[in-house]
Image: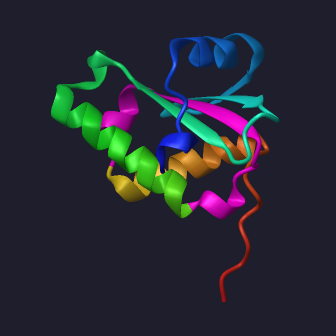
Amino acid sequence: MNKRQRVKKEKDFQKVFKKGKSFANRQFVVYVLPNEETETYRVGLSVSKKLGNAVKRNQIKRYIRQSILEINDGLKPHTDYVIIARNPASNMNFHEVKKSLMHVLRIAKVLAPEKNKS
């Protein structure tokens, strides 16, 4: 994910929180807000200090970023996403994080349905 694909500023986070819709499962909360100003999607991450030390938090963020990169084609463009990790995410490996993230993005109807792999 390059710099143009990240929600970085506090005012952008607050805009997504206030005007966006939220969707959740046990591991993640995702806020979604259409944003016609951007040519692609943007993602902001929030991992609380309650989830562990800095090493653990950074690991969770790396897993989420890599998951987003792998499901890149399925995400709606012109949209801002803010992903908040909940406590169960701290005990998950990469594949579990990706599966859970895809689940919550499908609930939000921003991820294309999974195609049958033959």
- Say how many tags the image has: 0
Looking at the rendering, which quadrant does residue 56 occupy? top left
User: Which contiguous range is marked in magenta?
Assistant: 71-92
* Residue 26, visible in the rendered structure: no
Looking at the rendering, which quadrant does residue 73 occupy? bottom right
Name the residue located 43 percent from the left edge and 55 percent from the top edge: 66
Name the residue located 74 percent from the left edge and 21 percent from the top edge: 20
Left/right of residue 109 with respect to residue 27 in the rendered view: right
Left/right of residue 21 with respect to residue 17 in the rendered view: right
Name the residue located 17 percent from the left edge and 35 percent from the top edge: 55
Left/right of residue 98 with respect to residue 48 in the rendered view: right
Q: Is residue 79 magenta?
A: yes
Colour setup of the view:
rainbow
Relative vertical location of residue 35 with respect to residue 60 in this rendering, above or below? above
Relative vertical location of residue 88 with respect to residue 92 in this rendering, above or below? above
Counting from the top left corner in percent of width and height, residue 32 is at 71, 30
Q: Where does the C terminus fall, quadrant-wise? A: bottom right
Q: 65 or 101, which lies in front?
A: 65
Left/right of residue 29 with respect to residue 21 in the rendered view: left
Name the residue located 48 percent from the left edge and 49 percent from the top edge: 2
Looking at the rendering, which quadrant does residue 107 occupy? top right
Counting from the top left corner in percent of width and height, residue 62 is at 34, 46
Q: Looking at the image, which residue sits at the far bottom?
A: 118
Q: Is residue 105 magenta?
A: no
* Residue 37, visible in the rendered structure: yes
Q: 80 or 26, which lies in front?
A: 80
Counting from the top left corner in percent of width and height, residue 9 is at 52, 19
Relative vertical location of residue 107 with respect to residue 28 in this rendering, above or below? below
